[in-house]
Amino acid sequence: MKRTIFLAVISVVLAGCCCRNEQTEVRTRYTLGKVGNLNAQELRLEKALKDAAKIPAAVEFAKGMFEVAYIIPEEHPGLGFTARFSEGKVQVERGLNVAIEPTLVIPLTDEGILNIKEFFKDGKLDDKEEFLVVNALFKPGWEASYRIPDLKSWLIRRYMRLDGLLHAVLLNPGQVKFKGKVVKNELSVVRVSGQWLIFSGLEGVADVRMRVAPKDALAMYSLIMRDLKNATSWGEKRKVMRNFAEIRDRCLVK
């Protein structure tokens, strides 16, 4: 009964009655970057992204994941690409379009960028490919989720158990390797002075610990960034919160 009442209160907040804060903009941290005189490898990366944007499976995966994504090639300082999802298509442009706020900011190695096309070209992701995609999106996805205005409400944070120090570990059941090493992805999340800070690695003694399977990571992201965003009625928002709670409870380390 108490849980039902609390959900009802939260749904009011989610509907917009108690949460008027604007989303924190991250675009101001970036500049357009390099848009001319790309070398051969940089042109190869651009082509790989544009080719991937034409693959139906990749477009379907992007649906609901982002409206705008900044893709940052880690091995090429000053280079960036903007991917925009609109009307069922993904458009890739050279440079970071700082006139629009990104949903996601995704740093990737050259291999990670080239893998996008290779992973999706057969129309599906196998377990290893899915893990590597989720691994690349794990921290960017948490950062994006914590930027939504709803999470500034203390009621929602209380229900989702977000206050305090959180440790989140992405499970790697297949012991997938990247560049010869078993991939380990661990995050520390804490709210300080009204803002969320997300660090790679496990820092301090956590109030809450989560071990997250790749499919659960994708599901939680979709619930917050797609379903919650598109929910219009109290009942729809309440359903999203219940679904999120089920996954969260499954991932909690008791």
Image: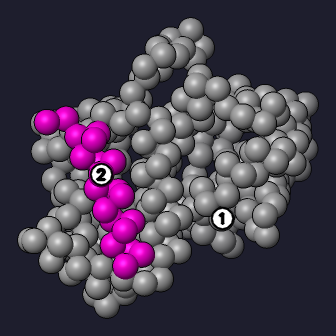
Amino acid type at image mark 1: Glu
Please identify the residue farthest to the top as the structure is shown: 180
Name the residue nearer the viewer: 229 or 235.
235
Q: Residue at x 82, y 33 (%)?
A: 121
- The mark nearer the N terminus, 1 or 2, is 1
The image shows residue 127 at horizontal and vertical percentages of 58, 25
Which quarter of the figure is the N terminus placed in? bottom left
Left or right of residue 165: residue 187: right
The chosen color scheme is: one colour
Q: Relative to residue 83, is residue 137 depicted above or below?
A: above
Q: Is residue 147 found left or right of 105 in the rendered image?
A: left
Q: Residue at x 60, y 69 (%)?
A: 101
Q: Residues within 10 Å of mark 2 (few under 14, many from 20)?
A: few
Q: Which mark is residue 51?
A: none
Percent coordinates x, y for residue 235 in the rendering? 37, 79
Q: What secondary structure is found at the residue carrying circle 1?
A: loop
Q: In percent of the image, x 33 and y 65: which residue is there?
A: 241
Is 236 above or below relative to 79? Answer: below
Q: Nearer the viewer, mark 1 or mark 2?
A: 2
For mark 2, what is the residue? 246
Q: Residue at x 87, y 48 (%)?
A: 54
Residue to which mark 1 is pinned: 67
**Considering only vertical position in the picture, is 233 above or below 241?**
below
**Placement of 147 over or under 254, stated as above or below:** below
User: In the displayed image of the protein, which residue is found farthest to the bottom?
Assistant: 17
Q: Which residues are magenta?
A: 235-254
- Amino acid carrying label 2: it is Glu
